[in-house]
């Protein structure tokens, strides 16, 4: 797959840009603040419907305007596909696929398959578990666009169950069997959706582990080996890919932590408490890796995702933003 055309209207710093691209390597060169990363961000938004820099869409719309438009044409195995996305701050976004409107912007997911490395990816190593969970979920969506629905369903149930926990928190509600019966029902919903999300993440970690090890070895052959693993908030069953077994394990864990959840008014069990473990040798990367090692580990996670997608028959667009900045000469040559 490659991007043949990219057009932006009122996206970030660009009032208008129209780029005709060709297969092979493309390099954007310019001074600081020129808008190179904004081009990268637009391509990534087409692939994931999200920015790698901000959590809301408002900053993507150029100051003084009401909407931004990203238009791309990608070529995959000789076939062209056009994707247009209209971003309107404060209103629902719109999308078109091959110039035809779609009912939900999620319908364009999968049209542009991409892997992005950016300086912000240092947060994969040094940041909170939420950054690493997002890495897994975004990759799962690129692999199988329906995965976006799994995450959305889980997040919706989690919000509603958390609201119920907060309303039921405190000893004065302990005798209200109606509230507890309602909580039982939401436990079932959370376990059902959470099991599917966990199964997708566990599968990804198993597939990514050897690719991360190879990528880091390529970048830093003299360094400690890099490994990854999945740390769950529950006792994962022996068959970790069995969704029914995962659902049963989640229900059991929710029952055990019920009192603690009511006391704190928050969910303490499930995928939102999981983490992707990153290790260099026998030490966790977070807190022990140097700056260069952290950069190389983050880059290895992205290269592993790229190789995984390639192995599954999809040649994604590989986007590298300022990738050489924190690599020494040996690692730069290895990456090139």
Image (cartoon, rainbow, N blue to C red):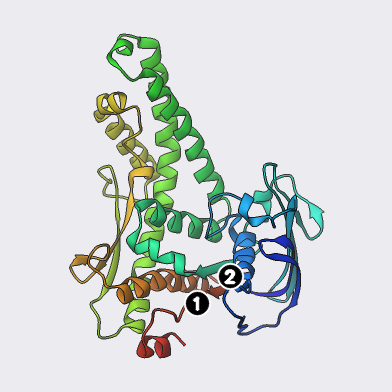
User: Farthest right residue?
Assistant: 99
Nearest to the observer: residue 232 or residue 119: 119
* Secondary structure found at label 1: loop
* Residue occupying image coordinates x 79% and y 61%: 98
Classify 10 Å Cα crowding around label 2: few (below 14), some (14-19), many (20 and above). some
Q: Is residue 6 left or right of residue 179?
A: right
Q: Position of residue 121 (x, y in %)?
A: 43, 65
Nearest to the observer: residue 235 or residue 53: 53
Residue 253's place in the image compared with 102, above or below, is above
Q: In 3D space, how far apart are the residues under numbered discs 2 and 1 (Cα atoms)?
A: 9 Å
Q: Position of residue 291 (x, y in %)?
A: 31, 73
- Residue position for label 2: 37
Where residue 297 sits, quadrant-wise, is: bottom left
Residue 25's place in the image compared with 92, above or below, is below
* Residue occupying image coordinates x 70% and y 82%: 22
Q: Tell me which label, 2 or 1, sits earlier in the chain.
A: 2
* Secondary structure found at label 2: helix
Nearest to the observer: residue 62 or residue 269: 62
Mark identifier at residue 322: 1
Q: Position of residue 122 (x, y in %)?
A: 39, 66
Mark identifier at residue 16: none
Q: Position of residue 184 (x, y in %)?
A: 38, 22
Classify 10 Å Cα crowding around label 1: few (below 14), some (14-19), many (20 and above). few
* Residue occupying image coordinates x 70% and y 42%: 91
Split into 4 quadrants, where in the image is the N terminus?
Answer: bottom right
Q: Find out whether the residues at labels 2 and 1 contact each other: C-beta distance under 8 Å.
A: yes
């Amino acid at each position: 797959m490659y991007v043949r055309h990219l057009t932006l209207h009122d996206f970030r710093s660009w009032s208008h840009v129209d780029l005709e691209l060709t297969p092979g390597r493309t390099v954007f060169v310019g001074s600081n603040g020129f808008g190179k990363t904004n081009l990268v961000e637009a391509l990534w938004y087409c692939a994931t419907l999200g920015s790698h820099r901000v959590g809301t869409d408002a900053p993507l719309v150029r100051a003084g305007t009401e909407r931004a438009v990203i238009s791309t044409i990608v070529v995959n195995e000789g076939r062209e596909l056009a994707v247009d996305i209209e971003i309107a701050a404060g209103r629902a976004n719109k999308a078109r696929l091959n110039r035809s409107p779609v009912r939900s912007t999620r319908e364009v997911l999968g049209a542009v398959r991409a892997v992005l490395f950016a300086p912000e990816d240092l947060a994969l190593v040094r940041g909170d578990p939420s950054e690493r969970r997002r890495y897994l979920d975004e990759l799962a969506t690129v692999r199988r666009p329906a995965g976006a629905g799994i995450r959305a369903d889980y997040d919706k149930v989690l919000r509603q169950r958390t609201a119920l926990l907060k309303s039921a928190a405190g000893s004065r509600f302990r005798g209200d069997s109606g509230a507890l019966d309602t909580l039982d029902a939401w436990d079932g919903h959370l376990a059902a959706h959470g099991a599917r999300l966990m199964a997708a993440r566990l599968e990804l970690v198993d597939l990514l582990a050897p690719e991360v090890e190879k990528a880091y070895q390529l970048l830093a052959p003299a360094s400690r080996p890099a490994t990854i693993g999945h740390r769950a908030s529950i006792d994962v069953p022996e068959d970790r890919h069995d969704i029914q077994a995962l659902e049963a394990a989640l229900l059991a864990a929710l029952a055990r932590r019920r009192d603690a959840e009511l006391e704190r008014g928050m969910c303490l069990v499930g995928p939102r408490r999981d983490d992707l473990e990153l290790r260099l040798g026998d030490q966790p990367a977070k807190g022990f890796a140097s700056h260069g090692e952290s950069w190389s580990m983050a880059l290895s996670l992205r290269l592993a995702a790229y190789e995984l997608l390639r192995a599954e028959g999809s040649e994604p667009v590989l986007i590298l933003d300022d990738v050489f900045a924190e690599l020494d000469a040996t690692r730069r040559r290895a990456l090139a």
